[in-house]
Amino acid sequence: MADVIGPSSSSEVVENGEDNLWRGGGWWERVRDMCRAIRGSGLGFGVCAALALSNLDADSQGKYGVASLCGAMAGGLSRLGRCELGRVVADCGCGSHPSECTTLFNLKGLLRSFSDSSGLHVNFSKSFLVPVNVSEEKSSHLAQTFGCDVGSMPFTYLGLPLGTTKPSILDFSPLVTKIERRLSGISRFLSYQGRLILLPPTVINQIDRYQKHCLWSGGDINRKGSCLAAWDIACRTKEKGGLGIVNMKNQNVALLIKYMDKFYNHADIPWVSLTWSKLYSNNSTPPHARSPIGSFWWKDILKLMDKFLLMAKCNPCKGNSVLFWHDNWLQDTVKSSFPQLYSFTKKPKCSLWFFVDQSLDRLFHLPLSIQASNQLTDLQAVLQEGVWDPEEDDYWVYSWGSSTYNSRKAYKCLQGSYEASPLFSWLWSAGNLGKHKFFFWLLLRDRLNTRNILRWKNKFLEDYNCVICSNSVVETSFHLFFECPFSSDCWNYLSIHWNLSLQPLDMVIEARLAFGSPIFREICHSMLDHLDN
């Protein structure tokens, strides 16, 4: 998507790394490409339309006409169910000058023409205008012409705060409150399985807290001690023994690392080219080895570098984006492969580009020891085998064997791998009700609120023994559903026999093989629910 840069006096569009003025040749093609890029975004439409008309002189306006420009905008607005003015950022220089007033009315005519032709109506009364570098008098004139209010930054767009500074926790409070209200209002009417399905994949810690209350407490935030399983276990996939709830922290990181991928792979987009040229033109030290610079947004992205390096490996060409000693661009880091040589280095944070282009006296404290000298010889042989091309950018390959970034696979890498019994995957594929499968999962995890668990939670009871049998045995989930004489008789009636000397997971697997029927799983779910009732 083209990024709009610069003031209204010479607004520019950066396309494919090249700067092009709106005025002059190729203007119409740039308008068309921008309109295609902003489809589905009311804010993008407002900015695009305002800049297009503000930089179009009177002759060109007559030549292209509102109807033609409206047709170009139609592709961008075709996905909007209801077109609103959006939150138009007014930096288009419209004011009291006659030609500027004409531009202003042309913009409103454009919106109305599109409304008449497409049926997607602009609701001016629900829209507001956010002035940027515009006087109060001009802002008032613009708002009166459009029939909307004057707003200010930060404002809410698509449910999230948008402004010129980093959003504070307070700016996100309306979103968090809305989610908490919805979860607490509906969760009390749902079973555990129903609450699990409706958990929304939204933003970070406070919402995690509301999710926990939704799942375990029925939305009651004042209820204590109701959590039946650790949240990190619940966030694992069902195949790995969890409940498949999205870990929002890792999900957020996986989505943000896409920016690291675009930056380090030198994607052909304006912000990447601008960041490299303005902030990291010195190739001697890679960006992640320097003190963070740039906007608050970019500094936050750079904090994810450690996680990026866990799943990515550099294939150097130019060598300016990889640390020579510390990054994993060989089979192992150069520091760990040549430790004696590293102890003599002068530049521990230099890039590969810097190292291959410098003399030994700039790289090392001379003279070298015998061991370090031998390691230097080996290292030089490794470097001679490499193919270094100063005209080609480095590219990064990911742990899943591709140079294409995939946020879903990155999320799995961030989640880590866990050893889990195949029984967990088996139980969730049953045809029983969701609440039966959820109950079986709690049983296999030994997280049911039996009397031994209540004692562990410091819940006082007069007796912690099993109330069904008279054997004076502490009530555990294993005893209650498998060892107790009543439960044992029920299972024997169904010709299901348990080897109580095995661990619970192994015991279920052995009983399944011995039973020899594909409906063993459904029978177990139904019987456990019957025993629980």
Image (tube, helix red, strand yellow):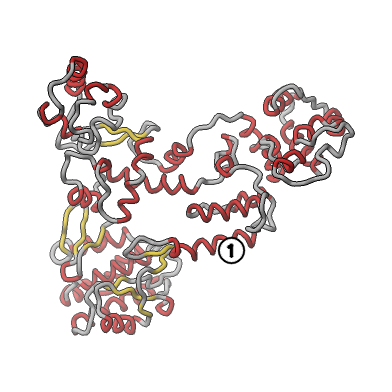
The residue lying toward the viewer, choosing from 175 and 367, is 367
Is 146 situated above or below 326?
Answer: below
Q: Is residue 32 left or right of residue 150?
A: left
Q: Quadrant of residue 398?
A: top left
Name the residue nearer the viewer: 269 or 386. Answer: 386
- Asked if 291 appears above or below 55 in the picture, the reply is above
Find residue 435 and report its image quarter. top right
Report if residue 473 is visible in the image. Answer: yes
Q: Quadrant of the C terminus?
A: top right
Q: Amino acid at mark 1?
A: Arg
Kindly give the residue lying farthest to the right in the view shown: 470
Residue 260 position by quadrant = top left
Front-lying residue, 310 or 206: 206
Q: Secondary structure at mark 1?
A: helix
Q: Position of residue 356 (x, y in %)?
A: 15, 29
* Percent of width and height locating residue 396: 30, 36
The N terminus lies in which quarter of the figure? bottom left
Which residue is drawn at the image coordinates 27% and 74% (left, top)?
A: 66
Q: Residue at x 14, y 62 (%)?
A: 25
Image location of residue 86, percent across then percent down: 38, 70
Residue at x 30%, y 52% (from the top left corner): 298
Mark 1, Cα crowd under 10 Å, few <14 / some 14-19 / many 20+, is few
Q: Which residue is mark 1?
A: 181
Q: How many marks?
A: 1
Q: Where is residue 500? Give x, y as percent.
A: 76, 24
Instruction: Looking at the picture, tell me which residue is in the foreground, 527 or 62.
Output: 527
- On the question of residue 381 being in view, the answer is no
Q: Is residue 44 left or right of residue 278?
A: right
438 with respect to 371 (left or right): right
Residue at image location 23% in from the left, 26% down from the top: 342
